[in-house]
Amino acid sequence: MSMFKILVYDGSFEGLMCCIFTLYEQKIPVFRLARIGEPLGELFAQTIQVKSNKAQAQRVWSGIKRKSSNISLERIELAYLSEIRGEDHTIIRYVQYLIDSKKNIEENLSHPVVQRLNDVVKMLHREKQVVKEKIRFQTLVNDIKYNIIEPNYNVLPLLKDYLLQKYAKQKWIVYDIRRNKGLYYNLQEIKDIQLDLPTKNPEENMFQEEEKVLQKLIELLLQ
């Protein structure tokens, strides 16, 4: 039997932590990650279906916290949010290096995975700053403000505290049209929202896409 294994998971952060749990539990030395639905492209590798398990994920995350500072926690979380293809594999290699090392590895930028995640953190922070500077609210309905964004990386979760602090006295929606996810603030709390958008037509331009989003937002708010 081949020692090479493919771990197939659901793409969630919890699922990624469960992949790490599986690697250690089964002592798997050589692996590749794939998300459900992705072509595997390997004829002789053994496939392992990794199911998301909250207890396993929490156990791994607690172990990471014991071995690291907030520097590593931020690197891992932001690398996941980057959605860069193959970055989930880099995260696992970083966690393995972190857990298996007897010394602090966070400042060892000569190590490729440490350097890579450090670079990703910088990329996410730059993108976050760019999005912050571009936010210009317009009025939707019932004096609710909105802004549509399309960032390269999934920085919307990183904007929650900033948006709440700066726009605490008005209702607003910030919607990421690329990921079909948004934040809605109703003066009491921030809610995650997702619209039931029709399949994207490749012939439509950005303006037409935004019109569809606005119509769905209006329908959602008038329910």
Image (tube, rainbow, N blue to C red):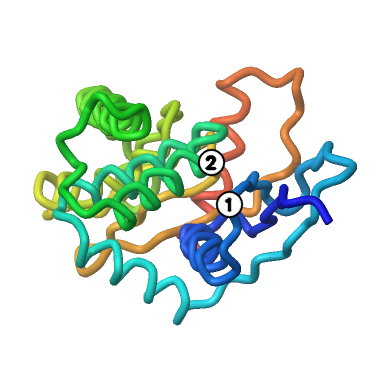
Left or right side of 154 for 100: left
Mark seen at residue 179:
2
Nearest to viewer (mark 2 / mark 1): 1
Residue 222 lies, with reference to residue 74, above or below; the image says below
Mark 2 vs 1, N-terminal side: 1
120 relative position to 19: left or right: left
Q: Is residue 50 above or below residue 47?
A: below
Q: Tell me residue 197's x, y (percent).
A: 66, 46
Mark 2, secondary structure of its residue: loop
Residue 110 visible in image: yes
Q: Which mark is residue 53?
A: none
**How many neighbours does mark 1 have within 10 angstroms: few (below 14), some (14-19), or many (20 or more)?**
few
Q: Is residue 173 left or right of residue 135?
A: right
The residue lying toward the viewer, choosing from 217 and 7, is 7
- Image coords of residue 171 (percent x, y): 25, 54
Badge 1 marks a residue whose secondary structure is loop
- Residue at the spot 54% in from the left edge and 76% down from the top edge: 53
Which three-letter amino acid code belongs to the residue tagged 1?
Pro
Residue 95 picture location, percent across and down = 37, 51
Could you tell me residue 137's position as x and y percent?
28, 34
Q: Is residue 209 left or right of residue 184?
A: right
What is the CA distance from the residue labelled 2 to the residue labelled 1?
A: 34 Å
Identified at 83% across, 56% down, the residue is 1
Q: Would you identify the image quadrant in which residue 135 lies?
A: top left
Identity, as a three-letter code, of the amino acid under mark 2:
Arg
Residue ID for mark 1:
29
Residue 131 visible somewhere in the drawing = no
